[in-house]
Image: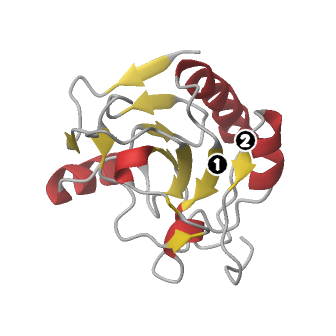
Amino acid sequence: MDIQTLGYWLNTRDRGDAETIAVVLHADAGRFEGTVKTLKMRRLSYHYYIRKDGAVFKFAPAARAAQHCGATYLYGGLKISNSNSIGVCLENLNDGKDPYTDEQRVALKELLGEIVAAVPSIRYLTTHRDISYPRKTDPKGFEGVDRIAALFDLAYWTRPGVPAA
């Protein structure tokens, strides 16, 4: 898989002793150039970004904690956070109308395969909505997270009461 970089890393911090256990899916509510500018300005980051055309960009090293989750919730004794997850963002307006492309879905599956192979401690796939609802709704309209998780023998981490995409 061809993964491009920006030529520099976006904001990260040390993971400390946290084990990386999850991949969190996001939507940026914008487009690539504006998202990069906003992330830099707000000192936020994702590990990976998948554009509409399926191009994959690496924004931060997986060994470091990207600043992508914000406040999250504990459920079933487990909290997914920046420290124990890898953030993957899909280019999408997050309005429930902007479609996710076939190219994005193919790239996401390829990327997840690489991430899971490189980080065997990952056990969950989830979304920003699932870990931060009602504060966050992304990736709105992205369906099939549970089926994608099953392809990689991952559990879909969700909380009761969080509405479907």
Q: Marks 2 and 1, Cα distance to the nearest angstrom?
A: 6 Å
Q: Earlier in the sequence, mark 2 or mark 1?
A: 1
Tell me the element at label 2. loop
Given contact means CB atoms under 8 Å apart, are the residues at marks 2 and 1 in contact? yes
- Indicate the quadrant where residue 8 lies: top left
Residue 94 seen anywhere in this rendered image of the structure: no
Please report the residue visible at 76 percent of the width from the left and 33 percent of the height from the top.
152
Q: Determine whether 111 is above or below 162 in the image.
A: above
Picture layout, residue 4 above or below residue 98: above
Name the residue rendered at 29%, 47% in the picture.
36
Residue 47, percent from left and from top: 40, 38
Q: Residue at x 34, y 65 (%)?
A: 70
Q: Which residue is mark 2?
A: 154
Residue 6 in the image, given as x and y percentages of width and height: 29, 28
Query: Where is residue 156 drawn, in percent x and y?
Result: 72, 54
Q: Secondary structure at mark 1?
A: strand
74 relative position to 160: left or right: left
Residue 95, given in percent of the width and then of the height, sits at 59, 73
Q: Residue furthest front?
A: 77
Number of disc labels: 2
User: In the picture, residue 99 is in which quadrant?
Assistant: bottom right
Q: Amino acid at mark 2?
A: Leu
Protein image colouring:
secondary structure
Q: Residue at x 60, y 68 (%)?
A: 130
Label annotation for residue 125 = 1
Quarter of the picture holding the C terminus: bottom right
| Direction from residue 105 to residue 63 in the image, left or right | left
Please indicate, yes or no, whether residue 113 appears anywhere in the rendered image.
yes
Q: Amino acid at mark 1?
A: Leu
